[in-house]
Structures are given as C-alpha cells and as structure tokens.
Amino acid sequence: MAQRIRRNRTFNVVLIAAFCIGILLGVKFLSTIVAREKLEELRALAKRLLERPVRIEMQRPEKGPAAPAQPKPPDELLVDDFDVGLTSGLAQQRKNRLGSFQGTFSMRPSFAVITKSSEVRRGTHGQSLVIDYRKEAGWCGWYTLLNGVDVTPYNTLSFWVKGEKGGEKFEIGLSDERMQNLEMDAFFLGCATSFIPGGYVTKEWKEVKVPLARASSELNLSRMGSLVFWLKYGGEGRIYVEDVKFKNDPEISKVEEYNAPQAQRDPQHPRALWVWKIDPVLNVKQRQDLFELCRRTGIAVVYLFFPEFSEPPPADYFQALAEYLKESHGLGIKVEALTGNPVWSLAENHQLCLNWIGFFLDYNKQKPAEERIDGVSLDVEPYLTAEWEKDKGRIKADYLQLLGKCRELIDSYNQGFRLGIAIPFFYDKEDGGNFERSILNYVDYLALMDYYDTPKDIIERARFHIDLAEEMKKKVVIGFETQDLVEMNQGKRRNTFIEEGWEEMERRLDIVKQEFSSKTSFEGFAIHHYDSYKLMTRGKNVPTKERPDNYLIKAPYRASNIAIDGKLDDWPAGSGYPVNEKRYVVYGGGAWKGPQDLSYTFYSQWDEDTLYAAVEVADDAVIQQKTGADMWEGDHAEVWLDMQLEADRTEAVNSEEDFQIGFSPGDFSKLPPEAYIWTPPLPDTLHYNDLIAVASSKTAAGYIIEARLPKEVLFYFTDNPQAGLQKGMQLGIMVDVGDMDDKAHPMKLLMSTSEGRIWGDPTTFGVLELE
C-alpha cells in the first residue's frame, strides 16, 4: 500500500537533502546551498538517511535575539469545507481552504473518484465532498495537502462523514512536510470507525475526532504535509465528507486517556515489548512516549530494533545510547537489542550476526552497568529462507551452528548478557521436538510467537514449549499479536487481539497466566508490537456495519423433550424454512443441477434448557468420509448462531457468543453422525460432544439430521450461562448445507439460508425468534 502525493518544490528538496547530510556528518547546519546538478543524488541520499532506524537529530542553533510576538492562532484551522475549487483538472484548480490542493490516488483495478454535492450536505448551503471508490487489488484513496501549516496549537483533527449505505470503512493518515517532500507514506492514525460515536459510519452525519497526540512523536506538527484517507477494506461504496479542520476539543484527551492500554506490572512474570520502527535512542519525544506506554502497561523488557551497522555510528550516538539505557534502567526497564534476518541462518552469513552481537558486547565493555545493553533478541527465522523446503536438514544444522557460535561469543565476554530467540509454535513438530531441544541448549529463553486470541488456543500451542523449557531449566516468553493481520494479509482474526481491545485481551491473558503460573519456565508475555499496541482501544475494535433485515425463522415452543432419532415425527408439519432455489447457492452455482441435487428444509424448536434443530436434505449422492473439523469436505450441515444478537447487532465478525456448529450425517455404516464446533474455541473441560445429541437417518431423497443443543454449551461465554432460553428471544441464525458428489474432491457446492452470506460475518445472518 503506497500513495505517492508529489509536490515539485525544488528549493525544499535541496534543503531537506542538505539537512540529512548535516545529520550524517554531525554538523550544526549547512552554510551553503548545494549545486542544482546534485539535486537528485542528494534527494535519494536524504530519503535513505531519513528511513534508517539510527538517525542523529540536528543540533539546535545558538539562541539569538528574542523573536517578535506571534499572533494568536485561530480557534479552529479550516482545511476544507469543499465550497471552493474543482475536483478535477490542474492542481491549482483543485484548491482547498489552505491554498493547496486535493486529489485521489489509486493502483488499478482499484480506483477512487471525487465529486462535490450541493444536495447531500450538513447545512442549508455549501457542498460536501463525494468519494466513490472500488477497492480490489492494488490501493486507492483521497488526499488533501496541508501546505506546511502549524497544527501544534490544536489537539484534534475533526471532520464529518456519512455513508451511502452505512458500514463503510477507511483509514486515516497524516504526513508532515518532510515526509511529503520525500514521497514517504503517511503515518497511520487508525480506522475512522475508532473515532466515531457508536463505532461505525452510518447514513447520518457523524463527527470523526482524531487525537493528534497519536502522531505527536512521529510527525513534525509545526510543518504539516498531507491528510490521507486509505480506502482499503474491499468492495465499493460512497462516502460524503464535510468540514475538515484542526481544533481543540476539551474531551479528546480524556477519551484518549481512558482508551489507552493499561496493565499491572508483574515482577514474577515481566512483560516484554517488541519495538521495531521508532528510535528512542535519538528521538527524545519517542523515548518519552515509549517510557509512558511502559509505565501504563507494566512493560519491564523492551526488544529494541537496531540495524546492521555497516559503519560505526558517530560518537554522539554512543552518548545518546548510554543516556537512553541509563534512563530505561532507572525506570526498571531492561533493553535487549532486536533484529531479524532469515539469511543469517545460512553458514556463509554467520559472521554478519556475530559482528552485530559483537558491537553491543564491545560497547558494554566501555560502560558501567546502568548504561549497558542487557542482551540480544534474535528474530532469525530459518524457515523463511528459500532453502528451508529444499534442504531443511542442512538449514537446521546451519542454524544450530549459528546459535552455538553466538553462545560462545557471548560467554567469552562474561557480562551476564542474555541470548533469546523468537520461534514459531510449530517447532514442536520438527524432529519430534528435538530441533527445539537442541535450540534450548544454546539460548536463555524462547520468545514463542503464539499468535492466537483465545486462552484455549494460546495454551494448547504453548504447552509443549513450556514443558520442554521446564525440563531444561530455560525460559519461555509467550508472544501475542496486536496488529491488524487481516488487513495486512498475514493472518486471520483469531491470530490477533486487535478486535477484542486491550481490556478483553487482559482478561484472556490472565487465564493463560493462571494455567502456567506454577511453571518456573513461564517468564511472562511479549507484545507484538509497539506501534499497534499503543493504538489499541479499551473496547472492541471490530468491523461494524448496519445490519439489514435479512429473514425471519420462527421456532415454536416444545413442552416435552424431542426424541433425537433422525426422524421428523416430533416436528410440526409446515413449520420448516425451505431452501430450494438457485438464489440460495452461495458457492458452486454452476454445479447446481436443481433441488434434487441439493435442497433442504430447516426446523427449530425450543424449551428453557435446549434449542432443537433438524434439517431434511435432498441430495442425490450422499458422501461423507471425514470427521471432526474436516467434515466440511463431505455432505454436512452447519448451523451458525449469534447468542447475543442485540449486544453485537452491528459487529461484522464472530464474537465469543457466535457459534459455527457442524453436523455430519455420517456414512450410515461405520461412520456415526457427529457435531463439531469450529467457533468459538471451547475449553476441553466442557466436553461438548457429551452434551450435544445428534442423530441421522437415510431417506429416499437424501438424509435427515436431528440435534439437541443444551444451554450449557450455547450460553457458555455469556454473563449468565444458566439463564436459558425465553419466549420472544431473538438469536442470529444462518444454516448452510454442503454437497459432495465426488470422493476425490471436497465440497462441490454450498447452499445457505443467507443469500448474502459472508463467512464469519453475523450481520449476514437472519433472525431466529422463539415463539
């Protein structure tokens, strides 16, 4: 994702390039302007320097005569009310209220088009900006240039937004003038839904309030470059924007303080934090922001990224490093150097890693204890090399040899210097766990990348590593993720805590800590990583949208128990919900041959303790060979239930109370019928298969499945698991049936009660009403 918003200001580019060279040489200021023929060379150099993690800040000039009094800034700084300027044509025609211009950016096939509307607006006169977009591959968005304005007198970026349909999403970014001139991406502030009352864009105007404190350590707020909207969530839509401005909002700091992550320090299980992108060594503001986050959240160890040093840093850098480490240790925060390069695993690159570690060991020799680095945390992942799949045995041997060399080098300095490495949870399967056993011979701790968001998943994947480390008297730090992995295409919602928010995250982490607190090998948790963690909110941060009225299924009350026998004797005739037309085919539409190929009728009844379900399926070739989580590869039914419909009506992702329950008819021979719950992940102690009853029978047209779902399962994650079902209660529901006609190929087609079905999106469910 990248937008390239260009300003052809040659004089500014020369100044920026000169500034960066001044940084590199450690001088106060350049006294002359660089010759024009060096412009492109300097510009490239400046960009490289400014993107390096290790940078030296320019020394401030000597204090001169007092500057004349500056006029009081206006109460608000209007960027654009969209009442002037065009939306196409030359830059000077596309004006905003700052005298600069706006436009769109895109990479096909995605696009964004802007117009203005005098019909859709907030007041009785003027215009709104209209952004039409379609996001597929590539990227698209809108920008407006800020003309170098000073926004330090303000604490809030504000604008008004409404959607054509409701539920639209976009992300907000700001860049300063330096970033703008160097064509660097804007700094991500968050999704617009994080700053809107109610949490989502609606068809009514809502004000978006973004705290500028989120960018205070990343941007030069006195010289602003651009405001950017990234339209990156897929699909197409239209949003309207009005009255973009910077202002002071008396409540914004209170809201931000309330939402900021918090956690208690636990000396027995210290928390660590991966820090990849900021530079607290040289940037004092970033340093203080990092310290403040550590104070609020109980962080006791920082894994801080340092680059490969191709050349020795200047003397000023060592002084700044010593100051930073002394301050960190004074606050009770240890600092371990972090880097990651998979190719260091290869034997021919070992010396690069040893040189990097040696830099810190040599630095420590010259410093007192309070100014020393505490260790190194290696994110060197051999399985990411191209050679891993082709020659895994050799790569493993090379990697173990590297760790042996690192251990030998560190021990030779006798500094109490820790060596830790990040590992994936699947190392428990490599050589039956012996690969990890060999790794533990050389390191002090493992940082386990256990990137899941439920206690059950985290515990299951950590247990082997905790037990092995216990046996070998080593330590394990359990790492978890706070980035939006779905948007990054690097994972699923279950792999990150971003949707749950930090308050729910803490509750779940406490369950994990209780599970492993008796193990001396459990050192604590590590958070990945600083940039996303500091922006987490207290409450949920899930995608939301307005829920349409999809369809209604009624479930009559049942005064006596239903016999779960795979028959429909206990079900009122005509009470079912039929699914028998092509419009219900949501996968494999071209393969559907008619109702005899696949169609079904769904039935439901209830009493205070139980929800009953039955599905009568017409299927001309019933095939099921799989069990458990793999049952979807054969003929089966799935019942999705949202047990707290009103509480999360607008949430477009599964929550703890949303079930995906699979029912297999078996093969009517050796393979019995069964139920399987894909989501939510229930604890093993619940033994839900002992509580859920399932039966099936073969019919002339296909098969029937009957099931009993008790309240102990359905209400497990609610506030009152024993509350049970009540008359008039409404649940979210979606019923899918999959069809397999060829044993060599899984699921040929899928039909659903929800024509607009989106997997894992409860807003596409219908409503089950208990009569």
Image: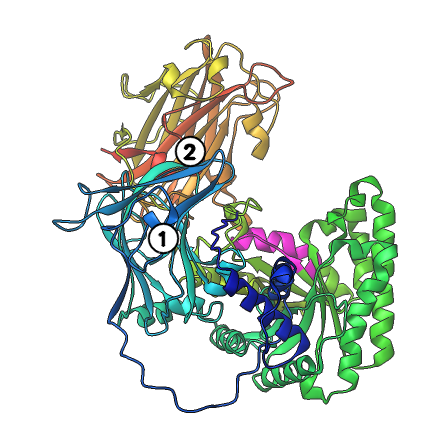
Number of numbered tags placed on the structure image: 2
From the image, give the main secondary structure of the stretch colored magenta.
helix
What stretch of residues is rendered in magenta? 448-466
Describe the element under mark 2 as helix, strand or loop. loop
Report which residue position mark 1 lands on: 101
Residue 396 shows up from this direction: yes
Label 2 to label 1, Cα distance in Å?
39 Å
Q: Is residue 575 left or right of residue 54?
A: left
Q: Residue at x 88, y 55 (%)?
A: 348
Q: Which residue type carries mark 1?
A: Phe
Report which residue position mark 2 lands on: 758
Q: Residues within 10 Å of mark 1 (few under 14, many from 20)?
A: many
Residue 565 shows up from this direction: no
Q: Is 458 part of what is drawn in magenta?
A: yes
Specify the quadrant of the image occupied by residue 734. Answer: top left
Specify the quadrant of the image occupied by residue 611. Answer: top left
Q: Position of residue 290 (x, y in %)?
A: 52, 74
Using the image as rendered, state which of residue 149 and residue 714 is in the foreground. Answer: 149
Query: Mark 2 against mark 1, which lies toward the viewer?
Result: 1
Q: Which residue type carries mark 2?
A: Ile
In which quadrant is the C terminus drawn? top left
Q: Position of residue 140 (x, y in %)?
A: 45, 42
Reply above or below: 163 against 250: above
Q: Residue furthest left?
A: 124
Q: How is the image coloured?
A: rainbow
Describe the element under mark 1 as helix, strand or loop. loop
Marks 2 and 1, the one that precedes in the sequence: 1
